[in-house]
Amino acid sequence: MEFRTVIGLEVHTQVLTETKMFCGCSAAASDVPNTHVCAVCLGMPGVLPTVNRAAVEKTVMTGLALDCTIPRFNRFDRKNYMYPDQMKGYQISQYELPMAVSGFLDVEVEGETTRVGITRVHLEEDTARLVHRSGPDGDYSLVDVNRSGVPLMEIVSDPDITSPQQARLYLVALRRILRYIGASSGNMEEGALRCDANISQRSEDGLIVGPKVEIKNMNSFRSVERALDYEIERQRAALRNGETLVQETRGWVETQGITVSQRTKEFADDYRYLPEPDLPPVEFDEAWIGMISTSMAELPVARRDRFVADFGLSFHDADVLTDDVIVADYYEQAIASSGGHYREVATWVSGELFALARNRGGFEYVTVTPEHLSEIVTMVASGEINALTGKSVLLDTAESGTAPRQIVMDQGLTQVSDASIVDDVVREIVAANPKAVEDYRSGKQAVVGFLIGQAMKQMRGRGNPDVVRQALLRTLDNT
C-alpha cells in the first residue's frame, strides 16, 4: 500500500522585547537564574497582568508578513494544566480569538515554489525553565523562573507539508522573515525558537489511515528533518504490518536517531480553556494595523528580487546576500559608495567577508566597515591594487581599523603594471628556473602558473597578474 505523508508544524518563538509579556520584569531569560521574577511571574494572589504593547505589535507584524488576516478582536485565555515549569498552574495564551489567521508562506523546494498555509498566529507567555541535575541523593530538577512570562508567539501551519525536506525549508524561510522584521532572534540553540511537528499518513486516495502523532524535543532544523524521516518510516512500516497506531506525543532522541512514546496526545478540552478574567479583549483599528504594515521592513523575497533587478546580481548571489538581514544591510551600505561595482562587492561579501565571519563567530563580529570594503573593491577594480593585495589589505583593516587606502600608501602596495619593470622580473625568474622552462617547451602548461607565482612573490604580490602573465609567455616563447 502506498502512503502520502501529511505534516503540520507548530513553531513557538520568543518575541524580542525588553520586558515580559504581562509584567515589567526583564525578558533576559539567560541571565543569572531567578533574577527577573516578580509576583506576576509567580501568579501571586492580588496581582494583575498588563499586556506588553511591543509584543502585540510584533505579533501583528508577523501575521502581516505571513499574509494573514488580522481580526479586529482577539482575546487572551487561560490554558489550565499542572507541570513544574508552570508557575501559576495555568498559562495565559489565546485559543478562540488569535491575533492573526488564514495566511501562507511560500517555500522554495528544489526550484519549485510550494505554498504552506498558516492557520493562526497567537501570543502567549513562555514557561519557566527546568534544569535537571544528578547528585548523591539521586536526580532532581531546579526551576529558573527568568523565562516564565517571556512573550512567546505560536505560529501554526496548515497540514500542507508533505516531506521532511519541505518542513526544514519552511522553518528556514519562517526564521528568515522573523529576523528581518525584528520579531525574534530565531536561535534554536538558545531556545528562542522551538518546533513541534504533527505527522500522519493518508492513502493515495486521500483517506486518513493513521492518527496524528506529535513529535517534540527537536533542537535544530536538521533534527526536525531527521525526526520526520524516521517517523514516516515507523508509521508506514506499522501500517503495512497491520499494527494499530495511536494518537500520541513522541520525543526525538537525537543520539539514537529514533522517536519514543512520551504520552497519549491531549485534546483542547483537556486544558479547560477559559477567557482570561484579568485582561479585557484586545481591539485593533484599521489605522493602527496600517501603521504596523507601513513600518515593516522589506521582506527577504522582495529584497532578493530587487537585488536581481536593480543590481544585476544572479538569483543565487542575491539569495545568499539576503539570507541574513545583517548581511543584506551591509551589502547595500557598501555599494552606496562603490561606484556601481555591485557584482564585485557581492563577490567580496560572499567570499572574503564570509570567511572572516566564520573565523570570528558570525557576521556581526566583522569589523570591516561597508565603506572600507567599498574602498578596497574600488581600488581593485581601478587597477590600483590587485585582488591578492586587496585580500591582504582587508585582513589588515579588520585587525587595525585603518582605512584601506592608508594601508596601501603606508606599505607601498600600489600595483606594478609598468611593462619594463615586469619584464626585468620575469627575465630573472626564467633564468633562475631552467627546468621549468624546459618543461614548458615540452608542452607542460602547468609550469606557467608556477612561474607566475614566483614572479608575484618577488614583487611582493604587487604585480599586475595580467601584465605578468603576458610578459612571461612572451619571454618563454622567445627564449
Image (cartoon, rainbow, N blue to C red):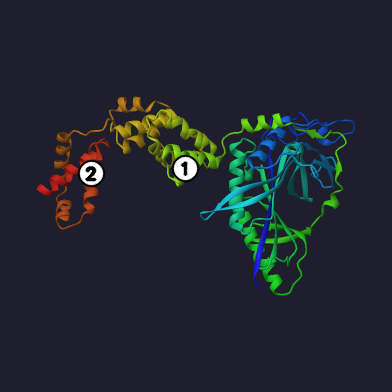
* Direction from residue 318 to residue 55 in the image, left or right: right
Q: Which residue is mark 2?
A: 454
| Foreground tag (1 vs 2) | 1
**Lateral position of residue 381 relative to residue 123, left or right:** left
Is residue 479 something that shows in the picture?
A: no
Position of the N terminus, as image quadrant, is: bottom right
Residue 406: % across, % down: 35, 24
Quadrant in the picture for residue 253: bottom right
- In the depicted view, which residue is nearer to us: 421 or 274? 274
Examine the rendered structure and indicate whether residue 55 appears above or below residue 116.
above
- Depicted 211 relative to depicted 113: above or below: below
Disc 1 crowd, CA 10 A, few/some/many (<14, 14-19, 20+): many
| Residue 234 vertical placement versus 154 (above, below) | below
Q: Nearer the viewer, residue 118 or 45?
A: 118
**Residue 7 placement (x, y as % from top left):** 67, 57
Residue type at mark 1 is Ala
Which x, y percent locates residue 444? 20, 56
Q: Can residue 183 be seen in this snapshot?
A: yes
**Which residue is found at the position 66% from the left and 29% from the top?**
291
CB within 8 Å, label 1 to label 2: no
What separation in Å lies between label 1 and label 2 (alpha carbons)?
37 Å
Secondary structure under tag 2 reads: helix
Question: Hey, what amino acid is under mark 2?
Answer: Gln
